[in-house]
Amino acid sequence: MRCDEVKKLIADYSVDRLSEKVRRRIEDHLVACPDCAAELARQEKAMNLVEQMQMVEPPAGLWNGVYNRITSPQRSTQRQNWLFRCPRWALSLGLCMLVLASVVFLGIDRAGYQKETAVPDPAAAEYIRSHAAASRYDVFADHVGLSFVAAMQSSDEQEEL
Amino acid sequence: MDHCQKLNNMEPGGSDSVLQHESSKMILPGEKPVELVDVSLIKRTKAGDLCAFEELFNHFHKRVYNIVRRLVCNEHDAADLTQEVFVKVFNTIGCLKAEEAFFTWLRSVAVNTCRDYMRRRPPRMESLDANLQFDDGEMAWELPTPDAGPEKELLDSERDKAVRRAVASLSDEHRTVVVLHHLEGMDVKEIAKLLGCPVGTVKSRLARAREDLSRKLLPYVM
Ligand SMILES: [Zn+2]
């Protein structure tokens, strides 16, 4: 193995990330090459310096902050109220569903109201039917809305009969 | 309960080896291993005893603060996050089944709290970052305690700052594995389990961080 190849792999060798075969070849090279052995030693020394980092004293008053937070009224809310345990996205999703549900129900309610009062128009029914048929294979068409209106029209016609 | 399950999954299979490994690496001679703690304190905390929890806090907060500070490299946020960790621990300690693995669990709460924070914070500018961290005094976390004259003190202090600056300049992912492996003494399998990634990923990050650090600390390792 060449020196540049070995040097590229020394860190992976140190963390035991190489296959047995490559590891052996690197070991053979290291025994014979002082330059690559020195590179390995430098990396080892750098990591030793990191490991010698001393711990620092925490600032005073940390406990007071913890104590205040676990004894404040919000804490009991946080521990007991399921609403606060839900992640924020779940709450947003729930809210969206609620809004969507009310819109749908209001829509149905209004449609029902219109059904009672509106006079069925055969021309409009024919237009909607042909529009729905034409839009069947249009991916951007509002298929749900069209079927809904078509269903309303057909029920109107049944009522007429 | 989902969050209970999640918390208990973080516990290691065998905590004994972990404790031995750590105590050989982290604890100075004559110092009581910080990982070992009276299990009755944990039981009392579970029952809501604040005095017991204060004792747990006093026993562990320096270690937790240092883990957090080394991970996030920000003095002010480290204090806030350390408090957040202990509040979480108090609120969820009921979920901890293996009481003898309390420290391992506490550390996983600390690491996950820091990871959430690091994901939220704006991306750092790598080239400027180390200097910014250094200039505001952040990286001068503590002065070493030299056993020789003022020159040695100065040299040690310079080297110490350089080491802190080099570690702070790593990407969040690389720094996390360096702190957990080289400063917390965790083995790669434990780290992989805690971070939820393959062992190979942990090793790869360690290797790249190793190259980066030895390059940045070149004047101190020649
Ligand atoms: Zn060579």
Image: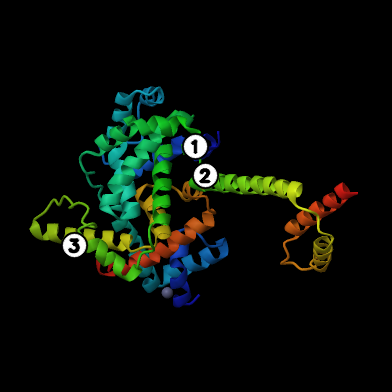
Q: Which residue is mark 3?
A: B158
Residues flagged by tags 3 and 1 on a common chain: no
Q: Are marks 3 and 1 in contact (CB under 8 Å)?
A: no
Q: Which residue is mark 1?
A: A83
Q: How many marks?
A: 3
Structural crowding at the residue carrying mark 1, measured as other residues with C-alpha within 10 Å and reported as few (<14), some (14–19) or many (≥20): few
Residue at image location 44% in from the left, 29% down from the top: B99
**Residue B81: image location, x then y, percent:** 33, 46
Residue at image location 47% in from the left, 32% down from the top: A81
**Relative horizontal placement of residue A131, taking residue B207 as reference (left or right):** right
**Residue B168: image location, x then y, percent:** 31, 60
Q: Are marks 2 and 1 in contact (CB under 8 Å)?
A: yes
Q: Chain of mark 3?
A: B
Residues flagged by tags 2 and 3 on a common chain: no
In the rendered structure, which amino acid carries the disc numbered 1?
Answer: Leu
- Quadrant including the N terminus of chain B: top right
The residue most toward the right is: A161
Structural crowding at the residue carrying mark 3, measured as other residues with C-alpha within 10 Å and reported as few (<14), some (14–19) or many (≥20): some
- Find residue A91 and name its label: 2
> Helix, strand, or loop for circle 2?
helix
Structural crowding at the residue carrying mark 2, measured as other residues with C-alpha within 10 Å and reported as few (<14), some (14–19) or many (≥20): some
Asked if B195 appears above or below B171 in the picture, the reply is above
- Quadrant including the C terminus of chain B: bottom left
Asked if B204 appears above or below B97 in the picture, the reply is below
Which picture quadrant has residue B26? top left
Q: In the rendered image, is residue B60 in sight?
A: yes
Q: Are marks 2 and 3 in contact (CB under 8 Å)?
A: no
- Front position in the image: B148 or B91: B91
Which picture quadrant has residue B49? top left
